Image (cartoon, rainbow, N blue to C red):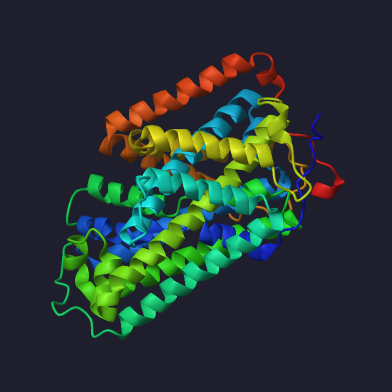
Amino acid sequence: MLKQGRLLRVLGLAFGLAAVVGGVIGQGILRSPGVVAAATGSPSLILALWAGVGLLVLAAGMCYAELAAAIPRAGGFYAYVARAIGPRVGIAVGLAGLFGSLLSLAILSFVIGEFLIRLGIPESGFGPQGIGLLALAGFCMVNALGTRVSGGLQVGFAAFKGSVLIALVIALLANPGSVSPTQPASVLRSDWIAIGTALVVIWNTFNGWQNVVFFAEEVDDPGRNIPRSLVFGILAITAIYLLVNFALIHTLGTADMAGSKLAVADAAGLAIGETADVAIAIFSVISVAAIANYMLVSASRLLFSLARAGLFPAQMAYVDPRGTPLFAMLAIALAASGFLLTGTYLTLVSMQAPSTILALIVVMAALVILRRREPDLARPFRVPLYPFSVGFVILFASALFVVSLIQDPISGALGLLVNGGLIAAVLILAGERAKEARPPDLNEDDQ
């Protein structure tokens, strides 16, 4: 019989920062600026929207930081909600996150295949899906080498992406700028629903910042390093996004930004010439690969935590001597491969926004409940300006939830139904085990 094993506490602040930054920055910032510019012709409002969502994410990140510092469990938000509200609600939130991660991993693997084909990699009869499967297999082999290797890889990916974007900003700002200066515009080019849609799009470009909490059992001194990783990582992402948008406004002007599906590539073409397409393609494939790899290892920690609590087979809670939850990782890769091969992710991924935002609201509720129910719980980090900061996140997230349903009511409603159906099925199959499926209690090493 396999010994369950234990995750290794071998990761530091550098990994935490790299996980937040490297797990977020990718295709979103290449595509989203044009959508946001189309909602308003005002450069100041464009920057204000990006800064506003960055502030929201920072506030949410500090809420997660308090929970992760107080309850440093690999299950992340599953552990917080299970403790505050109950195992079944915690399982529901954990399963929703797991399902979303599987879909994201499938589509990211497909995109890797597409980019590599565009760069001239021979298809050899496999196509994007086959290459995506090879990429997943490669990620598994690399991460099977151990937690230290996974952590070092994430640091390298994050350093590369941050450096490339900063270099691009410098190149764009050194360019003379748009030949047709941005025309004065009214505050809103379109209605408030369009602005709300732009906010949802920006929100999605920050997606992934929260996954660092799944590594709380592997990060040294989580009470300090998880909050630092979230706060400084989110600030760094927001700063990079604002600089990129400022550089795009300088180079293209808002009118050309609004008409571009890939504003960063268009601006790079003006600044660095014909090599821009290849450079952006290389950056894109590395960025997507970094996020896919991070999604695989973080989702495996969530599955590991659910299995350790008794919800999934005990083999999924096995940790090899190098700190990798090996069978959980392989199960995640296989499940994502199934979505990849069937192509169902193309439909399902568009349904995830409302479920993701709803899960965030539930986590915020868990924070409030724990503050009231367990006032003496050791909290190495506390959310500043509580309860106003938490109220701000809940209010803004609720508005985003409504907008996400209004802009695509059919996909949004189907997403909620699909998630609800899958969660109900797992809870029914688990039966009595679901009532007692709780993360292990804290011990002195976790404080």
Instruction: Name the spot of residue 216 as percent of width and height, x first.
Output: 69, 49
In this orientation, which residue lies closer to the viewer: 330 or 258? 330
Quadrant (top left, top right, bottom left, bottom right) of the N terminus: top right
**Can residue 368 be seen in the rendering of this structure?**
no
In the displayed orientation, state which residue is furthest to the right: 444
Which of the 4 quarters of the picture holds residue 75?
top right
Q: Is residue 1 left or right of residue 302?
A: right
Q: Is residue 352 left or right of residue 316?
A: left
For residue 369, above or below residue 70: above
Q: Residue at x 46, y 53 (%)?
A: 56
Q: Which residue is drawn at 43% across and 69% down?
A: 240
Q: Residue at x 84, y 49 (%)?
A: 445
In this orientation, which residue lies closer to the viewer: 414 or 269? 269
Instruction: Name the spot of residue 66 as percent of width and height, x first.
Output: 65, 50
Q: Is residue 200 left or right of residue 2?
A: left
**Can residue 1 be seen in the rendering of this structure?**
yes
Instruction: Name the spot of residue 9 as percent of width and height, x first.
Output: 77, 53
Q: How many marks?
A: 0
Q: Which residue is drawn at 45% across and 64% down?
A: 238
Which of the 4 quarters of the picture holds residue 419?
top left
For residue 333, above or below residue 45: above
In this orientation, which residue lies closer to the viewer: 17 or 55? 17
Q: Is residue 437 left or right of residue 233?
A: right
Instruction: Name the spot of residue 380 as percent of width and height, x first.
Output: 74, 54
